[in-house]
Image (cartoon, rainbow, N blue to C red):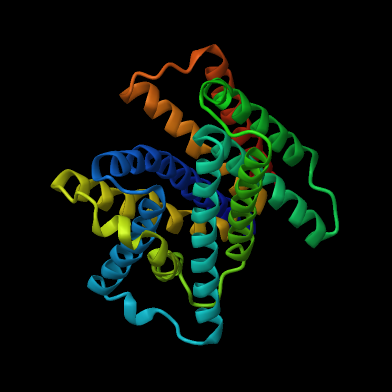
Amino acid sequence: MSISVVAPAKDRAAVALVTAGVLWGTGGLAGSFLSAQGNLHPLAVAGCRLLFGGLCAIGYLLVTGQLRAVPRGRAVLVRLLVVGVLLAEFQVSYFASVALTSVSLATMTTIGSVPVFVAVATTIRDRRLPAPATVAAVVIALAGLALLTSSSIGTEGTGGGGVLVGGLACALAAGAGFAVLTLVNGKPVAGLEPLPTIAFGCLAGGVLLVPLSLGSVLSADWRPEVMAAALFLAVCPTAVAYAAYFRGLRTAHPVVAALAALLEPLVAALLAALLLDERLGLTGWCGAALLVGALGVASVRQQRG
């Protein structure tokens, strides 16, 4: 009886994590459009993403009557504030890395470091080495991510010396923040569902970013298409994606969940090739295949675990 209950739960977790990764992959195009067409600074894009995403999710909870069911108490408040701070830290550190290095290098270092940080943290927490399949999945994923972005890194300018080191440090800080977010939300607070968690967490994170983004937001060109892009970014790659990710964390192993985040650069690269006619090349397609293989290995490990 326990197998018939647990297996579907793991299947639902896998679907939720894949959904999150795919939706995150659409955020890059939406954010780029918002920045270019709306004349928004990247930090303003991050602030709008969190603030608008939180407001949209809270509005949905209000309309559907779920807002009344959100529990109260110190544990809930602490969790929501922690989520907000980590989301804000992740966004600021990532965009600081982009400014100091390049989009490709910042993304590869940030996203690639997350499963490594999570694997190390869970090893220390559980006091046992990760399973060989888990280690293999992480190594394959890192190789795939490196191949997927190697050509872009070769063409984009990066700073030298201390600037490069500072940019990599910011990227690692972003990866560490996302890893902590993954581990913290792997243990849900009683009665606190994923959607309210991300709704109020995004709102808190967006409020924290207001001082860094207010000037750019007020001076932006808010044409209808820019507002539509902002709404899409707030709802799909933010509110829905993070809610799905937090739901998947409830039954998935943290390392498997962290590996699912690697779908973001994969989907972004595929969308760029499809919509923007950016060629991946043989190296890029090999990297994409390795990422899919890593997720397959992690999924098999999840089902057996």
Residue 237 position, x and y percent, is 38, 48
Residue 47 position, x and y percent, is 38, 58
Seen in the image, is 50 located left or right of residue 125? Answer: left
Residue positioned 55% across, 53% down in the render: 93
Residue that lies at the very extreme toward the left in this rendered image = 224
Seen in the image, is 20 located left or right of residue 223? Answer: right
Picture quadrant where residue 97 is located:
top right
From this viewpoint, is residue 259 visible? no
Look at the picture and state if 131 lies above or below 182.
above
Residue positioned 49% across, 59% down in the render: 247
Residue 85 position, x and y percent, is 52, 67
Please count the marks in the image. Answer: 0
Look at the picture and state if 252 lies above or below 296.
below
Seen in the image, is 292 located left or right of residue 55? Answer: right
Residue 146 position, x and y percent, is 62, 28
Seen in the image, is 121 located left or right of residue 254? Answer: right
Pick whichever, 300 or 146, lies toward us: 146
Residue that lies at the very extreme toward the bottom in this rendered image = 73
Q: Quadrant of the N terminus?
A: bottom right
Pick whichever, 265 or 4, lies toward us: 265
Residue positioned 43% across, 39% down in the render: 25
Picture quadrant where residue 211 is located:
bottom left
Pick whichever, 291 or 268, lies toward us: 268
From this viewpoint, is residue 145 visible? yes
